Image: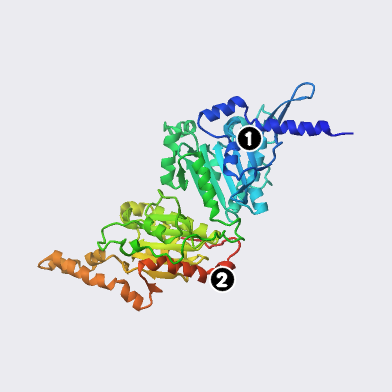
Amino acid sequence: MSWEKEVSEIERRRKLAKQQGGEAAVARHHAKGRLTVRERIARLADPDSFSELGEGAGVPEYNDAGVLTGFQPANYVLGFIKLGGRRCVVGGEDFTLKGGSPNPAGLRKSVYAEDVALTYKLPLVRLHEGGGGSVAGAKGGGQGGPSRPVGDPVFATPRFQSIARVLGEVPVATAAMGAVAGMPAARLVASHFSVMAKDAQVLIAGPAVVARATGEELTKEQLGGAEIHARSGVIDNVAADETDALDQIGRFLSYLPQNVWERPPYLSPEDDPERREEKLRDIVPRNKRQPFNMRAIIKAVLDQGSFFEMTRKFGPSLITGLARLNGHPVGVMGNDCHFYAGAMTAQAAQKAQRFMDLCNSFNLPIISFVDEPGFMIGSESEKAGTIRHGAAAIAAAMQSRVPWASIIVHKVFGVAGAAHFGPDGFVLSWPSAATGALPVEGGVAVAFAREIAGAEDPDARRAELEAQLAANQSPFPRAESFSVHELIDPRETRPRLCEWMDWIEPRLARNSGPYLTTMRP
């Protein structure tokens, strides 16, 4: 007796599943300039590496004779891929079926995505386009209604439990490829890295729901377009298109280990660890009010072409990103003096805390390029709760388990400066550095207000006092007092840091497992 009939049926259903929402639905999707979820996975993955889970899950359709006439596949595609030669879990909504709003099999597969990543300790990639549940499918067993079970049983595992747990064990990278709302939007931000195509939207609720609830008449773009969420911090990066979004996910994951029990991937460097960039000697101007390019410093010190910046438009006074130093993945922070002179705003503090947690979770040493004038001041800063967010960022730095190297490039003033130095950190200073409790100008204005006001020439006396106090903020006395490990020629920065990477190797080898912290302010 042969099983040929059943085997043929399996193959038939697999072919039907590949049709997704049908030719017409796929054509409409392509007409919008979008890839289908299967095309996205194929574009992201190494060639021929996708191994699907639940390919046969879906809703069959039979005629009166019991013969299969159609098959609606689960509208969430899930499986394993290889990305840069390393195995990952990938999943995403099929927008060509019900606009990505989950059908029963699709819901089960989407809920299972995090469990797969946790079971096999593999990075998780989510490719989102679609909404959450539908009110049409929420009709319950009210008076006169169907007497079927409504909702999950009370003993069911909460759906968000695995979504929260996965963040502590494996890298999670997500992309918004179109309109993303409801539960998919929550999953999008529950990740270590999120990117959205510039023509995508991320929404708590769509325009019709917002208009009904609040009276606001707004488009999807006005509610949750890329420009809005690049600045809100909901997503980390904006991509030019879907292909760019997929490329950014691949690049982000290339710096991270498979899970918190493994080491980040080392690549044999092509950049000389002894390279000395001549431009660094004069890149910081003597005029303290003249800005300079911190990103140029970062790129000059790290392995050439390795800096991958994240969350640029949220908290823009702080630069964060991943890079390599002599082949080793590292986390990078730096102040951007073009925004609030580099001051720590409430947003920058939140950004710093989240970034430190990423680095500590995946054993990435932190390199901090410091030009910190202190917390942002003024009424708006007070309304934003800057001091609380700033104190939480400092606590995150103090709770770090990874090694830190901090380079004082220009200035470190006030309490906020503590967020740029980790416990037992390696501290280098450039000759352009100035440190103290307050910037000279502000300190003189407060401490010598009467003396300046009573002087024959107030402006001259103010300048004289500022010059005297500025001498005390010179880096040379601090180097003489061993308040920094070394005062260096800026051109020595890369060689010194590459040497430091060798020193910290034993410490990195001891870091393994989930990163745990206490409560923060």
| Residue found 55% across the figure and 30% down from its top | 29
Mark 2 vs 1, N-terminal side: 1
Rendering coords of residue 334 (x, y %)? 40, 59
In this view, the residue in front, 271 or 333, is 271
In this view, the residue in front, 229 or 501, is 501
Residue at numbered disc 2? 506
Q: In terms of image quadrants, where is residue 392?
A: bottom left
Residue 234 coordinates in the image, percent (x, y): 47, 46
Name the residue tied to disc 1.
75
Residue furthest to the right: 1
Q: Is residue 228 left or right of residue 33?
A: left
At mark 2, the secondary structure is helix
- Circle 2 residues within 10 Å: few <14, some 14–19, many ≥20: few
What's the distance in space between the residues labelled 2 and 1, CA to CA?
47 Å
Q: Tag 1: Cα neighbours inside 10 Å, few (<14), some, or many (≥20)?
A: many
Q: Is residue 2 above or below residue 482?
A: above
